[in-house]
Amino acid sequence: MGLHIQHLLGLEGVSKEDITLILDTADSFYSVLERDIPVVPTLRGKTIVNLFYENSTRTRISFELAEKRLSASPLNFSASTSSVNKGESLRDTIQNIEAMKIDMVVVRHQSAGVPYFLTNCTDAVIVNAGDGLHEHPTQALLDMMTIRRHFGKLDGLKVAIIGDIFHSRVARSNAWGMTTMGMNVVLCGPPTLLPQHRDSLGVKITDNLNEALDGADVVMLLRIQLERQSSGTFPSIREYRDRYGIDIEKMRRLKPNVLIMHPGPINRGVEVSSDVADSPNSVVLEQVTNGVAVRMASLFLLGGGENV
Ligand code: CP
């Protein structure tokens, strides 16, 4: 049985069965990636456009690598070097690219809802690689894969997500996905960086760091997204670091086997100190490795695959 979704626009509303299928498939692809020749022919003949209107290091490279590992043909579009700069609209851009016969579009855009909009402009399968403040579903999937590989389960684990929650599509996708998988999610940050509609995500929300960290199995730290803020939302970076940054002193109060996670890019010395980011509890680079497997699984299953 394959996925029940046609596109991957977000994790809101995606079933436990579908998330489990993606994570199980990602585990199989993880084994493929450890082979001497880490390539399978499953998407041979498929053309996938990576449509990036916003900067990216991890997501863009890992999607392209996942496509190559699946034997698909990736095409990379960067808004900054395209005819977007001559005034071409998003609809015209996608319809011109589709005219060249493509099968899938991986899109990152600064505006929430663009992946959904594209489903009305093209017959291609759409995968959201991050849309504004809305969702970043493959990031949340790779986060859950990383946690599951360490604990052997997700159900019943407590995760504290700390930082600029309001501007974070990673927090939003993880809140949807992790609660669906039975995790106990606590979102924590300064009051001005917490969601305004607090009941909508079905998670606990607090500005009290001790409450968030108490009993946590996983601590996920988020960057302050200054580029998405129009005015100061907290007094200073130094005050933020002192109140919400995780340093070695605060880490000593956590469970010995706690996982320290971060989606990147890290602002060392702000949300996390270097000694914590580089500690044995940190799985930041494992997250990046797992991202390739999760993106292979997502593309493979959305392309109609069922068994690896
Ligand atoms: N985690 C993440 O989305 O990183 P990039 O912005 O570098 O893709």
Image (cartoon, helix red, strand yellow):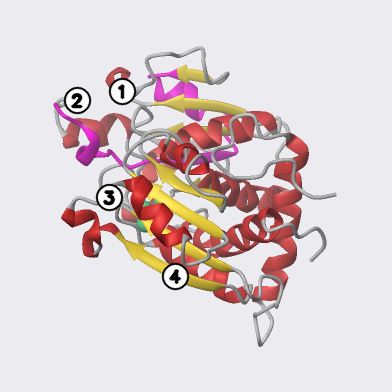
> Magenta stretch: residue 227 in it?
yes
Asked whether the beta carbons under mark 2 and mark 1 sit within 8 Å of each other, the answer is yes
Q: Which residue is mark 2?
A: 234
- Residue count near mark 3 (Cα–Cα under 10 Å), binned few <14, some 14–19, many ≥20: few
Q: Which residue is mark 4?
A: 75
Q: Of the residues shown, which amino acid type is indicated by label 4?
A: Leu
Q: Of the residues shown, which amino acid type is indicated by label 1?
A: Pro
Q: Of the residues shown, which amino acid type is indicated by label 2?
A: Phe
First of labels 2, 3 by sequence position = 2
Q: Say the numbered circle drawn on residue 56.
A: none
Q: Which residue is mark 3?
A: 267
Q: Residue at x 43, y 48 (%)?
A: 262
Badge 3 element = loop
Q: Nearer the viewer, residue 56 or 233?
A: 56
First of labels 2, 1 by sequence position = 1
Q: Residue at x 52, y 36 (%)?
A: 173
- Residue count near mark 1 (Cα–Cα under 10 Å), binned few <14, some 14–19, many ≥20: many
First of labels 4, 3 by sequence position = 4
Badge 4 element = strand
Q: Say the numbered circle drawn on residue 190.
A: 1
Q: Of the residues shown, which amino acid type is indicated by label 3?
A: Asn
Residue 202 in the image: above or below residue 180: above
Which segment is the magenta one?
206-231
For marks 4 and 3, give the one nearer the viewer: 4
C-alpha distance separating marks 3 and 1:
17 Å
